[in-house]
């Protein structure tokens, strides 16, 4: 194993933590893109590859199946679960090719993974680490819709102070974005550029009344499409 190298061991790049496998990683990402083009719905999330050895950028994420390992930001097709691009997290040296100061690190990661798919009619689903009004407006200007849970203290997220009963919604909207608060067992905040504030029936029945459980359309679609990331974690496990 000491004789197996993917790079020249005499040429060191101290700023790139992936320099030993950089060429292999770039070819792998290129093959992912060339072998499959995603359908309309795309999701971006974090994924963890099990690794318990010594590594400076190894992560511990209790909510993931592997818990210890190498974190990646992955973009996958919601219909098939196919990963068509990924960025390996390596701290501050993470490879980000798009820089917009107002979007922050999470927004620039999204724009890097989506740069070849903007303006082509796709819809993006992300969680609250990525979601922000600034990012969603930027995507909308590039003809790309988006939906995701959002933190209520995010910059430019409107204040919705209504106290709601379970199942009720309250929302604020602009010409491009809808921000909604829905009361379930706890408050659920959503930001979307492709949904209305509609309620739909799910296939599940209430365990007491046996009536269909209702949810906002955006939450129903969000749960369905973000499940593609869970499938990729199960395959790797």
Image (cartoon, rainbow, N blue to C red):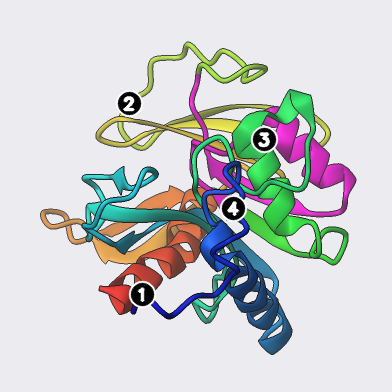
CA distance for labels 4 and 1: 16 Å
Image quarter (top left, top right, bottom left or bottom right) of the N terminus? bottom left
CA distance for labels 2 and 3: 20 Å
Report helix, strand or loop for mark 1.
loop
Residue 195 visible somewhere in the drawing? no
- Crowd around label 4: few <14 · some 14–19 · many ≥20 (10 Å): few
Q: Contact (CB < 8 A) between labels 1 and 3?
A: no
Query: Could you tell me residue 193's position as x and y percent?
Result: 71, 44
Report helix, strand or loop for mark 4.
loop
Residue beneath disc 3: 178
The mark nearer the N terminus, 1 or 3, is 1
CA distance for labels 4 and 3: 49 Å
Report helix, strand or loop for mark 2.
loop
Return the residue nearer the eye: 103 or 218.
103
The mark nearer the N terminus, 4 or 1, is 1
Q: Please provide the residue range marked out in magenta.
A: 126-152
Magenta stretch: includes residue 184: no
Query: Could you tell me residue 171's position as x and y percent?
Result: 58, 27
Q: Of circles 4 and 3, which is in front?
A: 4
Residue beneath disc 2: 165
Magenta stretch: includes residue 148: yes
Residue beneath disc 1: 2
Return the residue nearer the eye: 47 or 117.
47
Residue 45 drawn above or below residue 39: above
Residue beneath disc 4: 12
Query: Could you tell me residue 61's position as x and y percent?
Result: 27, 45
The mark nearer the N terminus, 1 or 2, is 1
């Amino acid at each position: 194993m000491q004789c197996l190298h993917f790079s020249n061991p005499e040429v060191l790049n101290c700023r790139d933590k992936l320099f030993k496998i950089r060429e292999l990683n770039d070819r792998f990402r290129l093959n992912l893109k060339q072998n499959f083009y995603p359908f309309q719905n795309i999701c971006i999330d974090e994924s963890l590859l099990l690794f318990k050895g010594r590594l400076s950028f190894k992560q511990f994420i209790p909510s993931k199946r592997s818990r210890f390992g190498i974190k990646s930001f992955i973009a996958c097709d919601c219909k098939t679960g196919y990963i068509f691009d990924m960025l390996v997290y390596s701290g501050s040296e993470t490879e980000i090719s798009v820089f917009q100061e107002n979007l922050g690190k999470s927004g620039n990661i999204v724009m890097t993974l989506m740069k070849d798919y903007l303006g082509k009619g796709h819809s993006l689903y992300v969680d609250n680490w990525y979601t922000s009004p600034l990012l969603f407006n930027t995507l909308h200007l590039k003809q790309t819709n988006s939906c995701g849970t959002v933190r209520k203290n995010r910059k430019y997220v409107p204040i919705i102070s209504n106290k709601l009963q379970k199942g009720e919604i309250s929302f604020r909207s602009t010409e491009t974005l809808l921000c909604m608060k829905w009361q379930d067992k706890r408050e659920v905040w959503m930001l979307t550029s492709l949904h209305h504030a509609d309620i739909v029936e799910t296939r599940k029945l209430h365990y007491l009344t046996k009536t269909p459980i209702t949810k906002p359309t955006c939450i129903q679609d969000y749960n369905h499409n973000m499940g593609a990331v869970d499938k990729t974690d199960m395959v790797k496990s």
